[in-house]
Image (cartoon, rainbow, N blue to C red):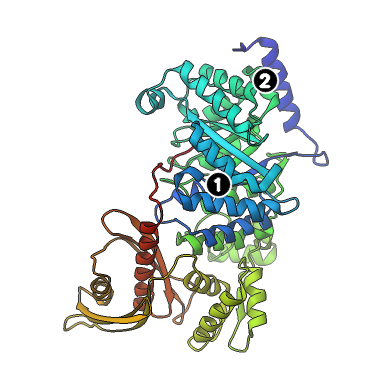
Amino acid sequence: MATMTKGRVKKTTAKRTKTQTKSPGAKREQVIIFDTTLRDGEQSPGCSMNIAEKIQIAEQLARLHVDVIEAGFPISSPGDFEAVNEIARTVGKIKGGPIIAGLARAKDIDIERCGEAIKPAGKRGRIHTFIATSDIHMREKLRMGRPDVIRAAVHAVELARSFTPDVEFSLEDAGRTDWKFMVEVVEAAIAAGAKTINIPDTVGYCNPWEFGEQIAYLRATAANIDDAIISVHCHNDLGLAVINSLAAVRAGARQVECTVNGIGERAGNASLEEIVMNIATRSDFFPFMTRVNTKEIYRTSRLVATTTGSRVQANKAVVGGNAFAHEAGIHQDGVLKHRQTYEIMHADDVGWTGESMVMGKHSGRHALGKRLEAIGHRLSKEDLEKAYERFKMLCDKKKVVYDEDLHAIIQDEISDVKRVYEIADLQFTSGTAGVPTATVKLNVKGKVKMEAACGDGPVDAICRAIDRIAGKEHRVEKYELGAVTEGQDALGQVTIRVSDGKRTATGRGASTDVVVASAKAYVDAINHLLAMGKAKRRTHPQVGP
């Protein structure tokens, strides 16, 4: 292991100082944006996506110009493998588009499966392999000593290199890893052929001062660090994911791993839009650049929010509904006189205009298809026809249809999951007096079945009736209702997580009637459960940096 010599520290410090004092006109170093919305973001409870949805988001991420898309964890399930493989086959072929990465533990079976999944991307494919390096993880989870971990890391990188020259290696829980041991592992991984070294704060434990120092120490101490790009992957358990990532960039990291809207396991990941707009807005403090097309940020945010059912809070930085709203009189007066008095970013810089009214009952198929393409949905002729029929029905209930409504329609109507159950009709009664009841008719493999039930409310009654038709009771683990747009005629969108006792699945539904939307979501969840039952069950846990 290299030692932190006086000369080495001076050399590294001088290099960092030079970077941070570039003149405004000088060429800025690029920060690589590695998006893990489809992998780590999907691990957020209730944010699971089907293959069609993942491909739509991957295509939008390509329009956003992210540099790397971590498309999934291929060994975890057949569905994840297929999603990574299809994204590699399609988005991975876009000229000048993103690199397509798959995640793999430092195990032969993981790496081999990942290599197969990314193969269609050719030279644009990356294997991201990892092993835990903190004492607590090595002792309690891996049951391995330090020498064994180093050997496993080297073997993993060398095996991954047999599939692709682009190998990224992560030290899981690096934030709690002994720094000297971190350097040993990093030097060994780089010597084995890793081109990117990721230092993740896996559990969101670090603060920006120590995390920045950790990256600076790595740069100053690892003898071969200039042969690789330093990456960081920060979690938000203490609300510090973004600032920790930015501190690391100032200390020498040149890749940031993040997710759209900051979604992810537990409290989430570093938010892509906040990272990018910090660099773009404070170029005096962050003398760097990204390739991201910031005008696609808002559209990407909304697509991810509607697809996952994970809504963006109103006061969320950059993409929240209130991000460019001004209610206080003194603020309104200042903005009217000069926008920069209270706005450090322009709304249109991130693609937010405040106006999404685009369609009405006089819009035809061609116009609908063009608008759907503009907001990230490229449909087959058959799927466009389905969407158009639903669009016309919605136009009879709403004067205008917004982009958010169109996202909801696509999410509701287009699915790659076979629909064993489809709602044919439902009737329900409820009120302040009497017992809520529901009668439900479902199309089941070409036959119509009908059942009735009572419940605590109309939604409960409908779910009980559906269970009777299915011949099985299901438990609702999560129920979330929100308005897609504003106004009394707004679509209600329901996200529901349902368990059959062995597996859980998420369903979504949208309607101007929230009870109907709830029924659609419940049926959607059951269809997903049935699809999961027919597929191979996941045998490997969703883990990662």
Q: Is residue 194 above or below residue 535?
A: above
Q: Amino acid at mark 1?
A: Thr
Q: Residue furthest left?
A: 434
| Residue 472 image point, x, y percent | 24, 66
Identify the residue at horizontal 65%, vertical 43% (top origin). 125
Upstream in the sequence, badge 2 or badge 1? 1
Tag 1 residue? 36
Tag 2 residue? 224
The residue nearer to you, when weighing 61 against 540, is: 540
* Residue 345, visible in the rendered structure: no
Quarter of the image for residue 387 reads bottom right
| Residue 248 image point, x, y percent | 60, 33
Quarter of the image for residue 28 reads top right
Graded by Cα atoms within 10 Å as few (under 14), some (14 to 19) or many (20 or more), the crowding at tag 1 reads many
The residue nearer to you, when weighing 426 against 247, is: 426
| Residue 289 image point, x, y percent | 72, 43
* Residue 492, visible in the rendered structure: yes
Q: Gap in Å between the C-alphas at discs 2 and 1?
A: 27 Å
Identify the residue at horizontal 54%, vertical 34% (top origin). 129
Q: Amino acid at mark 2?
A: Asn
Position of 29 compared to 245: left or right? Answer: right
| Residue 389 image point, x, y percent | 53, 83
Position of 308 compared to 257: left or right? Answer: left
The residue nearer to you, when weighing 202 against 147, is: 147
Identify the residue at horizontal 53%, vertical 16% (top origin). 180
SS category of the residue bearing label 2: loop
